[in-house]
Image: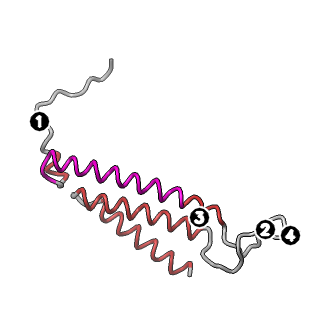
């Protein structure tokens, strides 16, 4: 099962990087969302997917059995899901606002919105 999931994670990383290299904001945002899911799946697989033994320390034991799934990556993934969703929502609103202002989602055309004769920012204060 872990081998199949590793292939799926590799496909997710490949698709995410391909989308993030695009010049359109929507594709970049989808790439960021897929990248977050790929990282979450990678952490989940690192904690073992098998259900051979529950992650419970029984009487007389001091550690988990070797066949038990590690519950720590699963707890970290719950936090990462919330953070990645809020980050995606922020980027989505930011992209929508940029689209409203510039009337395009093409990053090359957004670069044309910068003034050509603008003075450079100050080097120090």
Ranked by sequence position, the earlier of labels 2 and 1 is 2
Q: Looking at the image, do the residues carrying marks 3 and 1 touch, with CB atoms under 8 Å apart?
A: no
- The mark nearer the N terminus, 4 or 1, is 4
Tell me how far mark 2 sits from mark 1, CA to CA. 66 Å
Residue at which label 4 appears: 59
Q: Which residue is mark 1?
A: 116
Q: Give the overall secondary structure of the magenta segment.
A: helix
Q: Earlier in the sequence, mark 3 or mark 1?
A: 3
> Which of the numbered marks, if any, corresponds to residue 11?
none
Q: CA distance from mark 4 to mark 1?
A: 73 Å
Mark positioned earlier in the residue sequence (3 or 2): 2
Q: Is residue 90 left or right of residue 41?
A: left
Camera-nearest label, 4 or 3: 4
In the rendered image, the residue lying farthest to the top is 125
Is residue 100 inside the magenta stretch? yes
Q: Which residues are magenta?
A: 78-104
Q: SS class of the residue under badge 4?
A: loop
Q: Which mark is residue 74?
A: 3
Task: Name the quadrant of the N terminus.
Answer: bottom right
Which of discs 4 and 1 lies nearer the camera? The answer is 4
The residue at 59%/64% (across/down) is: 74
Residues 15 and 47: in front is 47
Q: Is residue 6 left or right of residue 46?
A: left
Figure quadrant of the C terminus: top left
Q: Give neighbour class at mark 3: few <14, some 14-19, many 20+ (Cα, 10 Å).
A: some
Q: CA distance from mark 4 to mark 2?
A: 7 Å
For the residues labelled 3 and 1, the Cα–Cα distance comes to: 50 Å
- Sequence order check, earlier mark of 4 and 3: 4
Q: Secondary structure at mark 3?
A: helix
| Helix, strand or loop for disc 2 | loop
- Give the residue displayed 21% in from the left and 58% down from the top: 24
Which residue: 52% across, 67% down?
42
């Amino acid at each position: 099962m872990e081998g199949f999931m590793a292939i799926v994670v590799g496909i997710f990383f490949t698709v995410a990087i391909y989308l993030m290299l695009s010049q359109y904001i929507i594709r970049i945002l989808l790439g960021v969302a897929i990248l977050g899911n790929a990282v979450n799946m990678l952490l989940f697989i690192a904690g073992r997917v098998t259900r051979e033994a529950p992650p419970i320390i029984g009487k007389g034991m001091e550690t988990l059995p070797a066949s038990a799934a590690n519950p720590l990556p699963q707890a970290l993934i719950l936090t990462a899901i919330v953070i990645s969703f809020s980050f995606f929502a922020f980027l989505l609103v930011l992209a929508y606002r940029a689209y409203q202002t510039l009337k395009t989602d093409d990053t090359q055309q957004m670069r044309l919105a910068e003034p050509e004769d603008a003075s450079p920012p100050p080097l120090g204060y």
